[in-house]
Amino acid sequence: MTLQVLVDQAKGLAASLCEDRCSIVDVSAVNDGYGGQTLLRTTILSDIPCMYEAGGDQAVEVAGTVITTTLHRIFMVLSTGTLAIKPDYEIVVAARGDKAALTFENPHLLADSYETLLTVSAKLKI
């Protein structure tokens, strides 16, 4: 059995463990023709097996109010497409069962990715 066969089998196993599906969406500002801009969302890749979990919290005080940001780690099957994630993209996890769809912004690839799963850190968009 070659190393590539083992890697392919590991990718299949990783995909089977990921109950959720996500899409990678490019978000860009375009002129609206009236002197302003509107956001254009273009799906780059869809139906990616994934799973996610809450990561660390970060609290900042602004004008006497504490604002807390919770980062999430998103694990998705590694591919050329998922490796091309940029910070201006959004990751949209599809609704499943009683869970609503979730949108994550400002994704960053993390160094602890493996041969089969890519790890991304991103902020949940509320």
Image: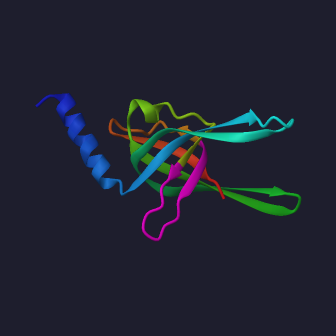
* View extreme (bottom): residue: 98
Residue 93 shown in magenta: yes
Q: Is residue 40 left or right of residue 103?
A: right
| Position above or below: 100 against 117 | below
Give x and y (percent) for residue 81.
44, 32
What residue sits 63% from the left and 37% below the top?
88
Give x and y (percent) for residue 52.
46, 55
Q: Is residue 94 left or right of residue 37?
A: left
* View extreme (right): residue: 63
Q: Quadrant of residue 32?
A: top right
| Position above or below: 87 against 57 | above
Residue 123 shown in magenta: no
What residue sits 49% from the left and 67% below the top?
99
Q: Quadrant of residue 90?
A: top right
Where's the N terminus, which quadrant? top left
Q: In this view, does 106 lie to the left or right of 36?
A: left
What residue sits 53% from the left and 59% below the top?
101
Chain part drawn in magenta: 92-106
Where's the C terminus, which quadrant? bottom right
Q: Nearer the viewer, residue 48 or 75?
A: 48
Q: Nearer the viewer, residue 59 or 31?
A: 31
What residue sits 18% from the left and 33% below the top?
5
Give x and y (percent) for residue 47.
40, 46
